[in-house]
Each structure stands twice: as C-alpha cells, then as structure tokens.
Amino acid sequence: MSIEKIVEQALQDGYLTPSMEAEVGRICNTASELSIEEYMSLDRLMGALLTGEVVVLPRKQFINVMEELVLSEAIAGVAEIEASSDQTLDVGDIAAYALNRLPPLYATTEEGAQFQRSKAKDELQEMISKQVSEAIEQNITRKPVNNKVFGSSPDVGSQLSSLLKSYANEFEAKDVH
C-alpha cells in the first residue's frame, strides 16, 4: 500500500493502526527518495495527528504464559539430560514441539498473567510435563535434518532430488541419469 493510500485511509477512519504505521515506516526506510506527493501526504498525516483528527492506535502488548511455563520445563529437562550425557538438545525445537500441542494462555496485564500461571500450574502442569517429555524424546531420537539441502537453484526438481537423497542416506545409492 502506498503512503498516499495509507494517509487517505487514516484520515477517513480517524485512526492510524500499528500496521499502517509500520508500512509507512517501511516505505520511508526503503525508499531512496520520496516523491512530492508522498511528502505532502506525510505532512497531511502529521497535521491530522497534531490536531487529533487522526489518533494512533496503541500496540496491544500481550504474553503467552504457556511459553514461559514450557520454556522453564524444557530448560530444566534439557539441563538434566545434558548434565548426565554428552548429548546436546535444542531447547527451541523442544519448546516449539510442546507448544504446538498445548493450549495458549494469553494475558495483557501482570494480574492476568499471574491468573494464567496459577491456572496452568493447577490444571495443566501434568499436560505440560508430558508434552515437554515427548518433545525431548523426539529431539533425542529423531535424525538431524539437513537444513542446507536446498541450494540457490531455482529448479524445484533438483532441489526435491537433493532433499530425497539427504533423507535416504541409509539406503544404497543408485546412480540415476
């Protein structure tokens, strides 16, 4: 969306959303030079913001308390395993695996977060522990994925072939032409 259209929309609606603000910032940061029309639109927006004709909507801050709880559990589990073995586990992978199998617990205030923490500890702790344990087990038993299989080749067929070869390393390689 162009600066002119964003300003038009803001003037029409009476507010500038965080995404509109971010888009204007992105355009200004990436453009080597703004046009006269863009400067005029930005000037109109600034005037409307100063007079109150347009207001900036605040960004709503929120947290997912489940992320905190899962990370704490995952860090403790990983530390225990890494202390007693030579394995290195990826806490991020473990947390993502578990979080994808657990309900989110969002809060917008510290009081709300405390409520969600208390609720989770009372009602969901067993489920959290189970999912983190499963995630750790998956992380230990799965084969490492070669994330660098895809090169810069635009040929999807050769990329797919490379991916299949990377997954078939325990099978006998056959020369295919």
Image: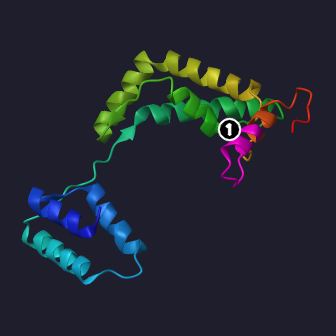
139 shown above or below 123? below
Q: Position of residue 28 (x, y in %)?
A: 35, 73
Q: Give the range drawn in magenta.
A: 150-161
Which quadrant of the structure image shows residue 51? bottom left
Identify the element where label 1 is drawn.
loop
In the rendered image, residue 154 lying in the magenta stretch gets the answer: yes
Lateral position of residue 148 relative to residue 57, left or right? right
Q: What residue type is labelled 1?
A: Asp
Work out which quarter of the rendered image holds the C terminus and state it: top right
- Can see residue 72? no
Which quadrant of the structure image shows residue 40? bottom left
Lateral position of residue 110 relative to residue 148, left or right? left
- Can see residue 26? yes
Identify residue for label 1. Answer: 90
Q: Position of residue 158 (x, y in %)?
A: 74, 44
Q: Which residue: 52% across, 22% down? A: 128
In the rendered image, residue 48 lying in the magenta stretch gets the answer: no
